[in-house]
Amino acid sequence: MKYFFLSDGWTTGRVWEFGGLWNELGWQRKPHLRRLNLSIQEQGETLWLYQVEDTVLMVEVKPESATGVPIGQVVLKRLITADQVIERLCAAPEAVSK
């Protein structure tokens, strides 16, 4: 599994795998991508931990509400390992489990 932290108020969009955009017809399912009930506080923001399957290379993220100036496309290309998650949680001043 791979992981990433995403700020509260943001959501996931398209997903890429080795062959390009995730093809639900080819895979016969949606990609495994879920928000875990674990977050950290960093610079006044809540960052939620997400889990994705190993075949996922990149994940598009966007604000839940499109108010103000549009941000455009944001793609997470550096997904982290479980060991990196543990390091980040240990270094965080405040980790919250809900």
Image (cartoon, grey):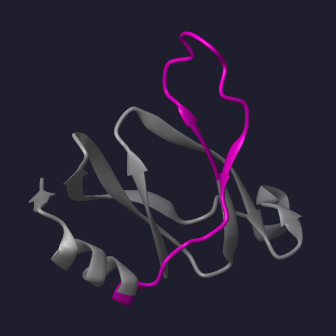
In this rendering, the answer to whether 41 lies above or below 95 is above
At which x and y percent is residue 51? 44, 68
Q: Residue at x 64, y 58 (%)?
A: 30
Q: Is residue 92 magenta?
A: no
Name the dominant secondary structure of the magenta segment. Answer: loop
Residue 70 magenta: yes
User: Residue sitting at 25 percent across and 46 percent down?
Assistant: 43
Residue 82 at what x, y percent from top left? 38, 85
Residue at image position (25%, 51%) is 42
Q: Which residues are magenta?
A: 60-83
Furthest residue in direction top, as rendered: 68
Looking at this view, name the residue that lies furthest to the right: 19
Judging depth in this view, the residue of 54 and 4 nearest the camera is: 4
Query: Is residue 46 shown left or right of residue 53?
Result: left
Give the tally of numbered discs. Answer: 0
In the rendered image of this protein, does residue 63 appear above or below residue 14?
A: above
State left or right for residue 37 relative to residue 84. left
* Residue 31 versus residue 82 in the image, above or below: above
Residue at 12 percent of width and 53 percent of height: 98
Instruction: Give the camera-side residue of 73 and 14.
Output: 73
Image position, residue 25 (x, y; %): 83, 59
Q: Position of residue 37 (x, y in %)?
A: 22, 57
The quarter holding residue 86 reads bottom left
